[in-house]
Image (tube, rainbow, N blue to C red):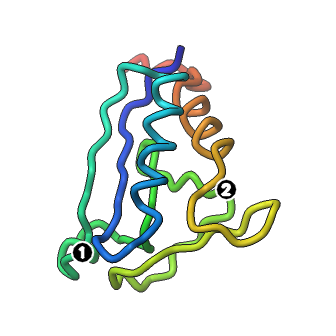
Amino acid sequence: MVAPHRVEFLWFAGCPNHEDARMLLAEVIAAIAPATLVEDVDATDPGTAAAHRFPGSPTIRVDGRDIDPRFQDPGDYTPRCRVFWTPVGLRGVPPREWIEEALSACGAPSAAPDLA
């Protein structure tokens, strides 16, 4: 079992995919890291979107890192839908494997202990 430090789920009200993505995230957490809490961020307001560097809906971050292995910050945080380049083409919901990998990697021990 894995216990990530922080999971964020960012979305905006006009996105038709955020509910499916949130359900998928909940399924993966239940299977891999059931004690994990998710911070839901409604980025419908442009100020909230900018404050959270929101690249589009849905966005899932584990320990501040986007789960998309090829993510590049667009620098534009306007509330909008997001699509993902997946092995099977463009999709509005990220692949389950990306969520699993992000949660698993998050729980991995660090390379060197902090002795300070």
Relative depth, front residue between 33 and 21: 21
* Residue nearest the viewer, comparing 67 with 72: 67
For residue 91, what is the image quadrant? bottom right
On screen, 106 above or below 32?
Answer: below
Q: Which residue is mark 2?
A: 69
Q: Nearer the viewer, residue 80 or 106?
A: 80
**Camera-side residue of 16 and 97:** 16
Label 2 or label 1, whichever comes before in sequence order: 1
Q: How far is disc 2 from disc 1 in space, using C-alphas?
A: 25 Å
Left or right position of 39 against 114: left
Q: Residue at x 61, y 57 (%)?
A: 68
Residue 97 at x, y percent in the picture: 68, 42
Image quadrant occupied by the C terminus: top left
**The residue under label 1 is which amino acid type?**
Thr
Residue at image location 35% in from the left, 48% down from the top: 8
Quadrant hosting residue 96: top right
| Count of residue discs | 2
Q: Amino acid at mark 2?
A: Pro
Residue displayed at 47% across by 30% down: 29
Q: Secondary structure at mark 1?
A: loop
Q: Is residue 102 above or below residue 74?
A: above
Instruction: Residue 71: give x, y in percent of width and height.
Output: 60, 66
Q: Residue at x 22, y 82 (%)?
A: 46
Q: Residue 14 sits in which quadrant?
A: bottom left
* Residue 22 screen position, x and y as percent: 41, 49
Left or right position of 70 against 75: right
Q: Is residue 93 left or right of residue 115?
A: right
User: Mark 2 falls on what kind of element?
Assistant: loop
Circle 1 residue:
44
**Mark 1 and mark 2 in contact (Cβ < 8 Å)?**
no
